Image (cartoon, grey):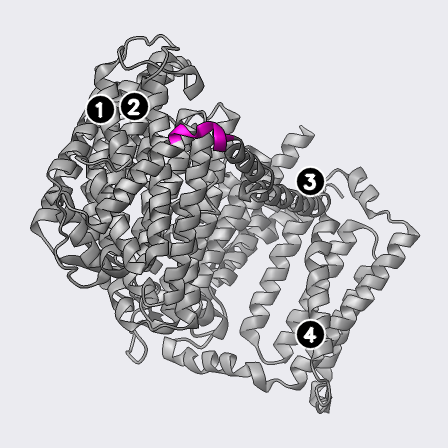
Amino acid sequence: MLGLLAAPAAAAAGAWRPRAAAPAGTLFAALAFAAALAASLAARGEGVVLPWAPSLGASFAVKMDGLAALYSLLATGIGLVVLVYSAGYLPLHLEHQGRPASEGVGFYFFVLLFMGSMVGLAMAQDLILIFLFWDLTAIASYYLIGYDRHREESRASAMMSLLVTGITAVLLLVGALLLYASHGTFSVPELAGRVEPGALLASAGLLVLLAAFAKSAQAPFHFWLPRAMAAPTPVSAYLHSAAMVAAGVLLVGRLYPILAQSEALLAVMSAVGLLSMGLGGVLALTRDTLKQLLAYSTVAQYGYVVFMYGLGGRYGAAGAAFYVIAHALAKSALFLSAGAVTEATGEDRLSRLGGLWSKMPLLAASSGLAAAGLAALPLTIGFFKDEFFFAAALERGALFGGLAVLSASVTLAYTWRFWSGIFLGRPAAEPGRVAGKLVWPVVLLGALVLFGGLLPGPFAALAGAAAASSLGEPAGAVQVAYHLDARPENLLALAAYALGAAIVVSRPAWEPAARLFARAGEAAGPERAYRVGLRLLNLLSDRGHELEVRDLRGRIAGILLPAGVLVGLGLLATPTVGVFRFGEVGADDLPLLIALAAAAGAALATCLTVRHLTLALVISSAGFSVALVYGFLGAPDVALVAVLVETILTLLLLATMRLIPPGVLRRGARISARQARLKAAVAVVAGMFALAVSWSTFSQPAIQRGAYERLIALTPEAHGKDVVTVTLADFRGLDTLGEITVVALALLGVATLLARGRLP
Amino acid sequence: MRPEELRGDMTRFVSRALLLPSLVTAAAILVKGYAQPGDGFSAGVVASLGVLLQYMAFGEEEASRLLPLPPAGLLCFGGLLLALALAAFPLLFGQPPLTHYPPPGEEPVHLGTLELITAVAFDTGIFLLVFGFSVGVMRLISGAREEGEG
């Protein structure tokens, strides 16, 4: 909860004095971290449930369980480190771009909003609540990715991430609604007990999974993540390790008790995870820009996590949770060191960097620790993540074991490439001085990676608790320790190291093929599909826009024509025998008939009128005749309203016409003979349709009458006799509320048009 | 005929004489709306017609002097706020929005033949809104015309 409070607090501090935003934000992040730590240690299994829309079944249900503890600790902890780093990085970043320091306030606001929504997402137990926080993270990331808003690339990247994750978020909502429709609850624990394998679970689960894959940048949605590198470096670090991208696997972990009941969904997870692992790994080997390499590595790493969830079994969920921790620590450290290196040298490409080991030993050492963690070398936390990975894969058979070794070796290869490319080799760029604030966070994270390698106990406990909430049952204690024997996991790790070294050494042999693959992906990959789709959508929207706003006739035709076609199709499709009947006409109906004839006459007269003023009067006289019809039909309440509506509308119409210069009106009234014939034809056809529809409705009044009769019968209950009034104020009161709001807004609109927004 | 010529003594007299009846009729339509034909909307239209007649007969300046009204924007948005507040009020007691009191089956409080129910208050909001809207739009249009001609 503190996390959610932090964002406004930082914004307030920033508004008060721009320089105060960073310390205030950091303070709140620290408090939030402490709160998350305390909550995860203290209260287990206690939740808060506040129904906020009981009639819709949605409630504000949050609970600090194992999974929530893991992700909120990550979000607040890494968030804290990132904020400290940003305090050093952001002023430099803004200075480079010649922007005022006050623009940093928004940055802190959205980072903290990001953090708050991640914590909320981690704790949410209700699908609708999950969806809300899910979209909140998307909004925060949109702002942060597009933070350098003067650069077009940043804006396009932000839009891409918002579209990819936002559109798929709708799938999450649809999936949630599907589950709700058949099981009557949005609550995740309750759903876990109610769902059963079948087509419904498979389709709802698939929709949810698509949303999770898009968020976690899994193939084929992976393309937004490398683009999102346009964000400032601290944002990238946060996005990758603990926030946005982690949200996808968090969702999988949260809904695992539901998803895991379908074998098909598990298979989908395995396949997508495997695909992303391969794709991300190969592309990471070809990238030259530091952050791009790391981005593709993230695609691959989350592929591991999804793959492990897909494998299931004893190690699946626990391994996935543990993997998220290890990856978050290592990856954020690598991103922050990439930012520090770029800040110091002004270079962001591997080909232009090298030999920084002697110049920046502290950064090199801690970033080396993080790299070792990512590459799963012993003595780091990463070793255990791969041990879980191998164990989970081996449970499913030798083939999976082999694939696991292959992907682990690719990870080793690109991680080596990243670290050695910066710190080893021939010195290429001369580094300037780097602020301590940019180095110490990396040192801290690197130390944590090492600490986790030496004392994995606390991290394993966290992962075990998270797995317990994913599996819905205590998942036996997660045991991690070094075993110096020839057990399969160790052998696979050794094999991975050897294969990884071989990949590094044999670089010239495979590089052309990998580059070709990357180029093919650019030419015909999903990103291209996204761009083409976007362009087509734009085109369609432009066409529609042009058609609609060019002139009023086009707009009216655009509405009436499709409506007419649909009604016509409906008429053709319905059997018409016995639909059209005449009722009895007696002598008492004479006044009614006269009124109807008057209305028809007025309607005909409108066709022959040329002057606008006369036209307005003729139309209103048609309206008054219809009001008369209501009166004769014995509905004085409806008749009263009709008369008054006609009166005020006629007045408004006449007054508006006085605003238009007479010449314009006269020109508007002139139409050619061809246009006139066309209009007559359209009017006749439309009139025939209207006649057919109303005739058939009046011939068989029983179908729809139920609803009206119920309302009329209920009217005395609501202390009224006037059906119109009671309907407006009581039965359909909410509709009325919406309508009068529109009326009030219309007044604002008129005031804006005629009096520059000054209300009369 | 120019509008100035319309504003003869007879027109002024008749429109002046019609103002009070139209306002009284509006009030009657509003408060009796539930039991007899009529509601906030109709009342708003009738009242605004009465007021607009004054504008037509006396011109805007003179009419505003003879009949000082609160700003139309205030009336309009005040009415909207009133309706919104009445709609939201039952939420405080855990009822769905726009729950009216007294509930069905209970006898409302009578004031003479007038029945006091919250739906009438909601209707008053609609009355203010419709009245403010009609008068406001007409004022805006006449203001714009004078600006265009002047």
Relative to residue A533, is residue B118 drawn left or right? left
Residue type highlighted by circle 2: Ser
A450 lies above or below A579? above
- Badges 3 and 2, same chain: yes
Secondary structure character of the magenta stretch overall: helix
Sequence order check, earlier mark of 3 and 4: 4
Residue tagged by mark 2?
A: A337
Q: What residue is disc 4 on?
A: A570
- Residue interval drawn in magenta: A504-511
Image x and y of residue A512, in percent: 53, 31
Q: Secondary structure at mark 3?
A: helix
Which numbered tag is attached to residue A659?
A: 3
Compared to residue A197, the image places residue A555 above or below, namely above
Q: Judge left or right: residue A668 versus residue A16.
A: right
Mark drawn on residue A211: none
Q: Are marks 2 and 1 in contact (CB under 8 Å)?
A: yes
Q: Looking at the image, which is closer to me, A121 or B67? A: A121
Q: Residue at x 32, y 44 (%)?
A: A246
Structural distance between the alpha carbons of marks 4 and 1: 71 Å
Q: Are marks 4 and 2 on the same chain?
A: yes
Judging depth in this view, the residue of A7 and A457 nearest the camera is A457
Residue A129 sits in quarter: bottom left
Quadrant into which the N terminus of chain A falls: top left
Q: How far apart in space, not on screen, are marks 4 and 2 (Cα)?
A: 65 Å
Name the amino acid, label 4.
Gly
Query: Which element type, helix, strand or loop, lies under badge 2?
Result: helix
The residue located at (23%, 63%) in the rendering is B93
The residue indicated by pointer 1 is A366
Q: Amino acid at mark 3?
A: Leu
